Amino acid sequence: MITITESAQEYLAELLTKQEDALGVRVFINQPGTPRAETCIAYCREGDVKSEDEEHKFEKFTAWFDERSLPFLEDALVDYAKDRMGGQLTIKAPNAKMPRVDENSPLEDRINYVLYNEVNPALAAHGGEVSLVEVTDDQYAVLQFGGGCQGCSAVDLTLKDGVEKTLLEQLPQLQGVRDMTDHSDRSNAYYS
């Protein structure tokens, strides 16, 4: 689980005293399990707490941890170091970008794992990438292409024979993939 050092707890508690409506802090990761993962600590106000959040009471404040982010927060460290400019809060989450996935992990995490470890390295040869937007209720992975794949004339072939085939081989519960990319912009397309 995440460790919040004493100095970080003191600093966060001091910040919270200046916020009249803050209940505590909420810790989460935007885009967990992807190269764009970003670990965040935000003021937690009325309406921000989700029923599935994990609550942890510290001596001077309460923190809520986003359930979806918990596997990515494993071994994370929040620290505060004073310096000449006042100080700096640092968050180190070594597992934020690379999930620890297994058959019990959420489907989104397993899809992202395959995309970022198998599919994107192949697409990178053409300056392209693909990312997961969502998984629909009927078990389709909605994807967005970027870089050299956006507007590429071979994107349908890449989508069906490359990305979809790879995902379905490893995640048979998926029904297929859908592309939500606007391919009318061909400015960076690998094949025009």
Image (tube, helix red, strand yellow):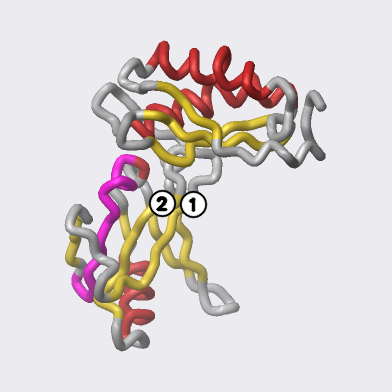
In this picture, is 166 found above or below 47?
Answer: above
Instruction: Say which amino acid is labelled 2.
Output: Ile
Towards the viewer: 50 or 80: 50
Mark 2–mark 1 CB contact (< 8 Å): yes
Which label belongs to residue 38?
Answer: 1
Q: Of callouts 2 and 1, which one flags the residue occurring earlier in the amino acid sequence?
A: 2
Corner quadrant of residue 171: top left
The structure residue drawn at horizontal position 31% and vertical position 71%, both measured from the top left corner, is 44
Give residue 136's position: percent from left, percent from top. Answer: 36, 36
The structure residue drawn at horizontal position 34% and vertical position 29%, both measured from the top left corner, is 139
Q: In the current view of this chain or complex, which residue is farthest to the front?
A: 184
Q: Which residue is mark 2?
A: 29
Q: Residues within 10 Å of mark 2 (few under 14, many from 20)?
A: many
Q: Which residues are magenta?
A: 59-71
Give residue 149's position: percent from left, percent from top. Answer: 69, 30
Alpha carbon distance from label 2 to label 1:
5 Å
Which quadrant does the C terminus fall into? top right
Give the structural element (helix, strand or loop) at label 1.
strand
The structure residue drawn at horizontal position 69% and vertical position 35%, both measured from the top left corner, is 150
Towards the viewer: 129 or 75: 129
